Image: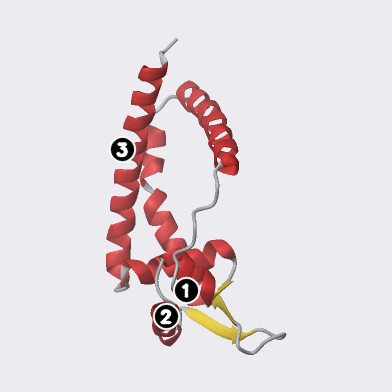
Amino acid sequence: MPTTKTFQAALHDWAETFMRRSMREWMRYVKTTGLSLPQFNTLMKVYYGGGCGLSEITSHLDVTAAAASQLVDGLVQRGLLERSEAEHDRRVKHITLTAKGRALVERGIEARSGWTKDLTGRLTAEQREAIAAALRQLTEAARRLEAEAPELPARANR
């Protein structure tokens, strides 16, 4: 049975390896799109949120409303996002992905995780089963911890 220190070291090594490989594949893909990291990050935010308002992008990127608006405008011009007015208040803008934007993000997700298929092939069925069970337990523990964590404060003076 591993000690807490041994477990933490193994977890750290895996997280570092996973993030390095995952981010490298993602960065390679983003470079092929011609988009900046903040632009692609905005597409990801909208994708995972199923749409959002400009204030959510402002908060997510930790930028001013003017900067977020300019960034969104560029993505709208590229045909990746759509901006519409809320029915209850025309001043409120709702941002969604176009089909082109959704496809771009989904290709990025596949590029980021594609290497895990190769990794899976290097493990036996028994190893995959044991690791999957451990990862489910780890994910549950992390979700409980996340639920207990206080929200980060929003940046002042936007």
Upstream in the sequence, badge 3 or badge 2?
3
> Does residue 79 appear left or right of residue 16 in this picture?
right
Residue 68 image position (x, y, % from top left): 42, 77
For the residues labelled 2 and 1, the Cα–Cα distance comes to: 9 Å
> Depth check: 43 or 154 in front?
154
Quickly name the residue at label 1.
101
Q: Residues within 10 Å of mark 1 (few under 14, many from 20)?
A: many
Q: Which mark is residue 75?
A: 2
Could you tell me if residue 17 is visible in this image?
yes
| Identity, as a three-letter code, of the amino acid under mark 2 | Leu
Residue at the far right in the pictured view = 88
Amino acid on which disc 3 is placed: Thr
Q: What residue is disc 3 on? A: 17
User: Which is nearer the eye, 42 or 89?
Assistant: 89
Q: Are marks 2 and 1 in contact (CB under 8 Å)?
A: yes
Residue that appears at 31% across and 37% down: 17
Tell me if residue 100 comes above or below residue 108 in the rendering: below
**Quadrant position of residue 2:** top left
Dot in front, 1 or 3: 3
Write the residue at 46% across / 64% down: 60
* Residue 89 spot, x, y in % from top left: 67, 86
Amino acid on which disc 1 is placed = Gly
